[in-house]
Image (tube, rainbow, N blue to C red):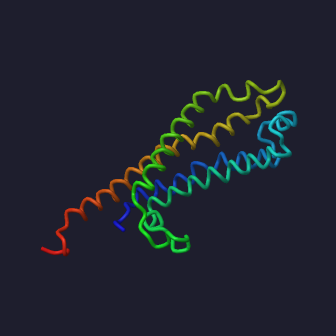
Amino acid sequence: MKQVPRWATWCAHATLLTTLPSGLWRIAMGLQIPVGFTEKGLAEFAIPGWGTAYVFGLSVFAETLAFLTLGLVRPWGEVWPRWIPFLGGKGIHPVTAIVPAASGAIAVTVLTTWSAFRWDQAGVTMAEGSFESGGGYDVVMACCYAPLLLWGPLLAVVTAQYAWRRLGQRSQDALQPLGGGA
């Protein structure tokens, strides 16, 4: 494994932090901790009920996807872990990681940017009295979701570095004479 630059490792770890505030906000909502929604508003999200499972699941799913970014800077992103049946110990073709990571970076960037431009529209389809105006709840929600704007760009940078490192390494290997020496 070629040395991973420290900045790439920091960026990969930062992706975990970009999803954490919104996940914690959703979990608080699922636990009926006041985050701005009235009982009427929580009922529209089916909280308590299946809506609680949904917001918990969404939070875990987002954090899991962010966690996969670490594979771009760790050995398990280049060689399948031994415990995986049939693949354990085999090398991972770079494209197997690059294509999903690049697609994810584009999708997350588009989704979060689109959502940011619509923050002023949040809750407009909900019944009157579903969200408490004032009290700073909207500011807290915005602060919890704002870090998601960094997730896509951070993933893109780490993916580009992984591609450069892995595909550049393959190019260098191809240039080596057969037998390994001159």
| Camera-side residue of 37 and 152 | 152
Q: Position of residue 88 (x, y in %)?
A: 50, 72
Q: Quadrant of residue 148?
A: top right
Q: How many marks?
A: 0
Q: Quadrant of residue 35?
A: top right
Residue 82 relative to residue 21: left or right: left
* Residue 76 to residue 36: above or below: below
Residue visible at 44% across and 61% down? 73
Residue 151 relative to residue 177: left or right: right
| Residue occupying the far left of the picture | 182
* Residue 26 to residue 124: above or below: below
Q: Position of residue 55 (x, y in %)?
A: 74, 46
Residue 102 relative to residue 68: left or right: left
Residue visible at 51% across and 57% down? 13
Q: Quadrant for the N terminus, please.
A: bottom left
| Camera-side residue of 161 and 9 | 161
Q: Position of residue 50 (x, y in %)?
A: 82, 46
Residue visible at 66% across and 45% down? 22
Q: Quadrant for the C terminus, please.
A: bottom left
* Residue 137 to residue 180: above or below: above
Q: Position of residue 174 (x, y in %)?
A: 23, 62
Residue visible at 53% across and 52% down? 15
| Residue occupying the far front of the picture | 86
